[in-house]
Amino acid sequence: MKGVYSRGFFATCLSLVLLLGLCPDLSMAKTDAIWIAPAKAERKPSGQPGQPHHPEGHGESSAQQSGRPAQTSQAGRPGRPEQAKQSGRPGRPSGSGGEHAGHGGSSGRFESEHRPLPVRTYQIVPEQLLPEARAMILQADGTARDLDVETCHTNVFSVKLPMEEGPMHGPNNIYVFDQQIKDGVLEVRTAKWLTIHHSCGWGHDYRNDPERLKARSLESAPLDIVVDNLWDGNFHNALHSGDELVIRVFSYGKPVAGVTLTIITEKGWTKRKKTDADGIARVQLIRDYYPSTWQLFKRTELGKLAMTAEFTKEGASNYKGEVVDKTHYISSFSWKYVPAGDDYNSYSYGLLIGSLGFLGSGFGIFQYRLKRRKPKKTVVFDE
Amino acid sequence: MSSIRRFLNNSDINRFRFYFQLFAFVLLVYGGYLAINIGEQLPTFACVFGEKRGGSCYLLGFQHQMTFPYARLFSGPGIGVLIGLATFAGFFIIFNKAWCGFACPLGTIQDWLTILRRKMGIYYSNYSEPVFKGLSTIKYILLALLILIPMAIGNSFFGLPTLNHDFGVPFCMICPGRTLLPLFNGDISQLTIDFSSKTKMVFSGLGMGVTGMFLAGAFAKKRFFCLFCPMSALHYIFSRASLLRLTKDGEKCTRCGNCYRVCDVGIRAIADDLDHKNIVKDDCMMCLKCVSACPEDDCLKATYLGIPLYESTAEGFFRRRLKKDD
């Protein structure tokens, strides 16, 4: 019984409670999957361990807005696992969207879209990554390179981002892969995270460059979830509730049919779909934000969604000298969405006010001109 | 050389301006289709809300920068503000207020409405001199507000609470460019009232009201909105340093009043002022119609770096007049 009440047990229980609280249907989210989430160290300036995380999550955004040297200090300490541990909450699947909220929740942006950082630090959750795990980045310009994963610590890794216009200016895909044999099946796991590296100072020339903005797939990824149209031309998240998600699933660069996609929102809406022959699944996102009065409405209210894709491939394969009959591929990706413009914009009122402005001005001008019209002068001769 | 100069002076600047405006409109509104981006600090209403714009109006970025707290404004990021202002000034100095007369998409829309009115045979309206003077101060008030309101977001004035970020770009919210220019990209999303907050609701309501007034006003009065344009007020700060100038030789002026009568904005000073050589006033848009309408040799002229580009000549005046009478 003593072991049962150890600190480790409490930590595990706390982790599970938080995970369940943030991701309402964890079974649906597939605990088999690994997830990438920005490390807590990134969201907290140094010297403030244990600072409670704001439920709305202002994280780095607020630090930047307040002029605190959070990013500068982070830049010098990439991937400090101690801080990730200190930050309080244990790893939760980013699929729950929690980390998204931590990045400018009030502004509705994703990882502070228009505030670049020289280094971004991520952690892999849950912390079950195998030692031979590897990480890669597919840069905004389409080139890929390896990243270091400090698996000896707490699965934390960092990505250096040059603070200038260049190959990383735009959306960058970060991947973590690992594999192991479990119950006679080779389990191949992929986690994906999409980050933006952009400063308005570098310009918006790419807004008309579909190549820079397009959703990409990494050819070496065992299973890759690619969601189209997540960015608008100004590098803002373009996903709104009610939108149709066009999800493409690739395995080693080729589309895969029959992959089971599971999408879960933070509020519990779930959707399962299989990819078609082209490896595409279309899912209409739910509209799930209905405050009781319009005064309570927040157009930046974040909805969070997690998605997993998985399929099993029959056939013998060899891993580290061990032969298995099946390979199970699983991949994860998480994103966020904000209320659709139609939820709070009114065309009828807009056109009504515009028409009133037009007619009122027109009438005013007419009256003004009428007033200024000079009557014809007639000269009457007095005979 | 003299034959080229004669050809230029005899030419019809209005026709040239019409086609140049069309070109500038296409460039600034649709330039994005060709991946053209002239710059983010343009001294003209190349509206940022238009997805396929070929450049961006400086006022949005300027208002955005004004939201910085004093600590940021007067430290490193302040350099960015100065660079932005210097870029704006650099663009402006090249063409002076001809940005308004030849390039502004919102000005072009007003000129198209004027053509429509003329074709419909409706006579235009004009302000009386006292009304004109009174209204022309509005642009300075708007310029002050577009600086002060965003500043009150990042800083507290007199201990008052700071404003929320919905006040971030107050002028853009009421600018008819925001509502009208995206329409040319097929985007009608700006024609709405935004009920997501009270501030947004008020601003978007004002924006739509101003749009209605703009359309009615520009139909009845030539270049109706230019009198209230805070960009024009910001221009005037740098106008004297510009390479393009409009000069007047008061000794050659006979005060016939042609220049005033053809002025779309209605600047009386252009006819009355015999003392100043630089005749560019704060409301002037350098359309050069006044030069075209002047019958006196060398009385009015547009110069670039001191080199005359377009001068008033008796010959040019009569040629244009005869062409019109034909």
Image: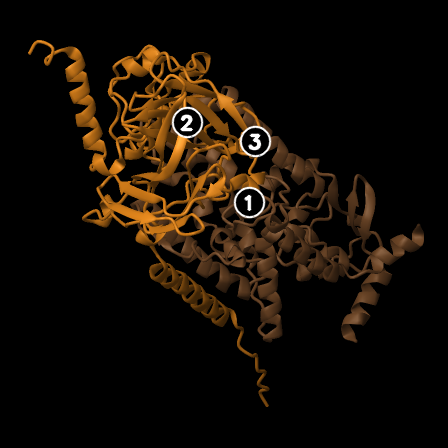
Give the residue displayed 57% in from the left and 45% down from the top. A208
Give the amino acid at mark 3: Thr
**Chain letter belonging to callout 1:** A
Establish whether labels 2 and 3 are both on one chain: yes
Q: Are marks 2 and 1 on the same chain?
A: yes
Left or right: A277 with respect to A85?
Answer: right
State whether discs 3 and 1 lie on one chain: yes
**For this rendering, which residue is in front, B203 or B268?**
B203
Q: Is residue A205 above or below residue B205?
A: above
What mark, if any, has residue A210 been given in the picture? 1
Host chain of mark 3: A
- Pair 2/3: label in front: 2
Give the amino acid at mark 1: Pro
Crowding near the residue tagged with mark 2, few <14, some 14–19, many ≥20 C-alpha atoms within 10 Å? few
Which lettered chain is shown in brown?
B
Q: Which mark is residue A143?
A: 3
Q: Earlier in the sequence, mark 2 or mark 1?
A: 1
SS assignment at label 2: strand
Amino acid under disc 2: Asn
Q: Quadrant of the C terminus of chain A?
A: bottom right
SS at badge 3: loop
Give B130 or A246, whichever is nearer the viewer.
A246
Looking at the picture, how far across and down is residue B240, in whole percent? 68, 37
Real-space Cα distance between discs 2 and 1?
Answer: 40 Å
Tell which of B31 and B138 is nearer to you: B31
What residue occupies the far bottom of the structure in this picture?
Answer: A383
Q: Position of residue A228 (x, y in %)?
A: 44, 45
Residue wearing tag 2: A318
Colour of chain A as rendered: orange
3 vs 1, front mark:
3
Q: Residue furthest left?
A: A1
Q: Is residue B133 visible?
A: no
